Image (cartoon, rainbow, N blue to C red):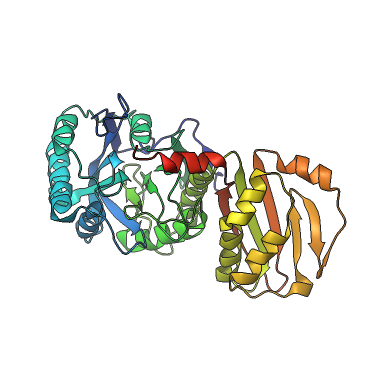
Amino acid sequence: MEAPLIDVPDGTITTPRGFLAGATAAGIRDDVSGKLDLALLVAEERCAAAAVYTTNRFQGPPLRLTKRHLADGKAQAIIVNAGCANSLTGEQGVRDAQEMAELAAAKAGVAVEDVVVASTGVTGWLIPMDRIRAGVGHLIPTEDGGDGFAHAIMTTDTVAKQAAVRFQHDGVTYTVGGVAKGSGMIHVNMATMLAFLTTDAPVDSAVLSALLRETVDASLNMLTIDGDTSTNDMALLLASGAAGGETIGEGHPALPLLGAALGNVATTLTRKLARDGEGASKLLEVRVDGAASVEDARKAAKAVAGSILLKAAVFGNDPNWGRVLDAVGYCGAEAREERLALSMQEVEVYRDGAPLPFDEDALRQALAHSEVRIRVELGVGEATATAWGCDLTPEYVRINSEYTT
């Protein structure tokens, strides 16, 4: 019998074997002194690699370069800077992304074509390449450098988001690690943040892309903070194979275990991203059951989690449950009013086409908790999905009114 997933306390992106990371304070933004803002992840061998990218039409130069480099399904290093997104920066931005890849390749001793470039921060600013050049010289990748990497990719994040789990198959222990950043400009459908996943399992490149897509669709793509989608964001998966064992391909008995491990790490990161939404005081979790299809379940869950009116109500501890069902009604999912059921914080407020009596003061108190759970039953099928978000607070407005000043 296979062992269950084992959480790795303080796990990072370098917890899986075969990965090193380093970070430094390059001073990319003048107004953020001493902060780690440049990071490098290096694999000891070329990895099977896959990525999914932002749906924003104006993808930044780092993403366009990364797509070309990942065309062969291989990568060996990631260079990331925070503070400047290098998007909407014209031909100079293209040249800067290319130079970042070249600098990382020289530092890591890998081919330029095996370097992934990621930039995050303010749109429309040119990267201060003199600071990047100097900073790369201070990057020293090590096995315990994952925590520094996680802090270096943060922008308005208040905490680093990282996780790792282990599982065993046929006597071999495999590890999956992950890191993500993002607090604002986050909306569903990849992409809305930077997320990097690593595993030391030997994975066939032919299954890696589908594995990542399935993982992201059920986790990161079910996250919404503010309805905006960045030009720069991606989720990337690297498989080093350093743990050994048989190559995991289509039909391999370890593939479902690997999928579960990736899903666990990605969901953990998603929840951490939601909890740290810009200005957020509460994590919002919306589960939809009884949908006609997974697509419908996801539509409904995303619509509820993304409702600005509901997010404001959650901030104010207002049990205005009509906003939930209103979002379900306009999302396009199949639903019938007479079959709906709704609960907030385990308090049922609606069933079978009619509101139910409930203690409003008690529900207000329950909504004041740091985590708010909403459950919707559509009653037309068996599919289910969960989406995550956060409340909308005055602090969100303050942060985004001062972002470049």
In the image, 150: left or right of 95? Answer: right
How many marks can you see? 0
Q: Quadrant of residue 289?
A: bottom right
Picture coordinates of residue 364, whole percent (x, y): 77, 44
Q: Nearer the viewer, residue 375 or 395?
A: 395
In the image, 241: left or right of 190? Answer: left
Q: Nearer the viewer, residue 253 or 85?
A: 85
Where 291 sits versus 368, above or below?
below
Q: Quadrant of residue 24?
A: top left
Picture coordinates of residue 222, whole percent (x, y): 52, 57
Q: Nearer the viewer, residue 199 or 59?
A: 59
**Residue at position x 15%, y 47% in the image:** 96
Picture coordinates of residue 112, whole percent (x, y): 14, 48
Q: Quadrant of residue 73?
A: bottom left
In the image, 91: left or right of 152? Answer: left
**Residue at position x 18%, y 48% in the image:** 97
Report if residue 16 is visible in the image. Answer: yes
Viewport quadrant of the C terminus: top left
In the image, 114: left or right of 160? Answer: left
**Residue at position x 34%, y 58% in the image:** 53
Picture coordinates of residue 275, whole percent (x, y): 55, 41
**Residue at position x 19%, y 26% in the image:** 138
